[in-house]
Amino acid sequence: MSKYKEIKGFKVQTLASDTAASVAATGTWASAPNMNVARNAMTGFGATNTAAIGAGGYNGTAYVASAELYNGSSWTEVNDLNTARGYGAGAGTSTAGLFAGGHPGSSAVAINETWNGTSFTEANDLNAIHSEFRGCGTSTAAIVAAGLTAPYPTITNLCEVWDGTNWTEVADLNIAGVGVQLAGTSTLAIANSGANPSPTARATATELWNGSSWTNSTASNSGHREGAAAGIQTDALMGGGAFPTNSPSVIANTEIWNGTAWTEVNDMATARSQMGSTVGQQTNSQTSLAFAGETAPGGRSAATEEWTTTPAADFTKINLGQVYYNSGSNAYKVTEQPVPGGSWASQTSMNTARNQSGSSEASPSSQGVIVGGNEPPQSAKTELWNGSAWTETSDLNAARRDGGSGGVYTSMGYFGGTSPAGPDRASNELWNGSSWTEVNDLNSGRQAVRGSGSSSTSLLCFGGGNPSYQALTEQFDGTSWTEVNNMNTAREANPGSGTVPTTLCCGGIGASPSPGSAQALTELFDGTSWTEVSDLNDARWGGGTVGNSSTALTFGGDPPSTSYTANTEFWNGSTWTEVANLSTATGWTNGFGSAISAIKAGGYTTTQVATVEEWTVPEANSTITVS
């Protein structure tokens, strides 16, 4: 017999903490006791959150030799370095570590000192002078990399490995840099960020060390020059630092590396760089200690922060649509993707810079088509997106720009627009995933026209100019176009998205209050007629729109007040809400995807661009409110 719960409801899990995408995503920084001496240019080492050494640095007056030991509850002054200096590299634990190189006030040094848990002892020097560099590993097997060397201050990519007795120069980093972060061991390490005016690629660069050579890998989201590092090559943490690299401002950003990519997690409480951290023998990124550092140019800190994560036994993975009860906050919660929490990030650029292109608007963000446009002159080029790269494929039969489009990756249409042969072209071409075929034309040729649709057999064309603003709407059934009810307001360059029975159209250029005016009007097509609904917050034309009549995103375009806009707005079926902007204000752009995940491709800034941005909305836990 079925249980009542199985018939009428479901079990709600009780959890002590919120679900998360990973153990790392549960991590937070918490304040810990301050060091005794505030300083920047700090060097630290240690393997746990309860046992670390901080040594050297600059106290605002001079470089110091003082060292302090952390026992999990307080810092205690211990025996000093033999040579006062800052900007050195550390490795090892609180009972067996080393402090190499650094800057004593002029130039850099090759001095190396080992720590036995009680005092520092001078040992064999580095082969080259180094400062503003970092290290990782143990007291008998460490690696240091990059920084400033002779003739001082030359930015270097030199790397040296310590075997407990001597330093040996090994293969260099691919990109030289100052303040490069290291984590891991002497045979398996990860290097991230750093500064180098040329090339600037060092800013967020990641390189992996296999014991004999460095290999370039996925860049971080932010630069963490002279930040806090912890973990191993496949599970590392970078927190704080200075970014942008060559005009540094301190940041609090924290990122986790899973072996292939970086993910932003909870920020530090205090933004800073030039801090010490536990770069010893940790086995993962789940714990770390960050201490001292520079909070702003000329500002020094004694603050300590401790990074911890939810223990694996208590960790529950986040799942979209999951409902649970959080006993800690006494609240019912649901896991969802709230569109206002989304953001844009740079993606791989197209092969050809252009604006006024068509797109497979109904495609997912991982697989789409951009076609035609203005390079100038008008383009016939087609590019396919596979989620990571663009590939040029079969051209249109007739080059043109500013046409309407709709459909998906393997089945779409591109119609209307302007060609070298003249404006107001009525041509219609269909895409089958590999080539374009000319079919029956529109009844009314128009430029700056827009469209929607789910495939090459179900398309809608609306608005445009011929030569005046048009309200005409035509529907395509795979064979021919049929005029249907017009929009309420004539306009052109009016982006739209959706399917034939349910389409959204917003913005554009119209005649009111005067010819050439940007519009904020929004209309919905229900398969028979258009209805005016809530306006955009910002009037504009020539932007991109993705989604459908109930959830959509519109981005970029040309407003009346500025040249182009970066504004992005979310449509929830009844109203528009402004959300995170594009990274770059762009007009005459296009894209594909949904309100949850979208691609913006090409457009116009001061010229045609090939740049691409990707919109993503992370999963988040929201409190369920009952009224």
Image: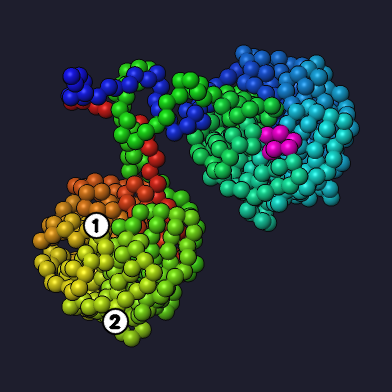
Distance from Cα at disc 1 to Cα at disc 2: 26 Å
Residue 369, above or below 118: below
> Residue pushed farthest bottom?
421
* Left or right for 470, reference 250: left
Residue sitting nearer the eye, 18 or 123: 18
Sequence order check, earlier mark of 1 and 2: 2
Q: Position of residue 508 (x, y in %)?
A: 25, 64
Q: Residue at x 32, y 30 (%)?
A: 322
In reply to whether residue 399 is colored magenta, the answer given is no
Residue 17, above or below 154: above
* Res 75 quadrant in image: top right
* Res 254 quadrant in image: top right
Residue 513, above or below 123: below
Q: Which amino acid type corresponds to the residue marked 2 in the rendered image?
A: Pro
Q: Which residues are magenta?
A: 184-189
- Tell me, yes or no, if residue 321 can be seen here: yes
Question: Label 2 belongs to which residue?
Answer: 423
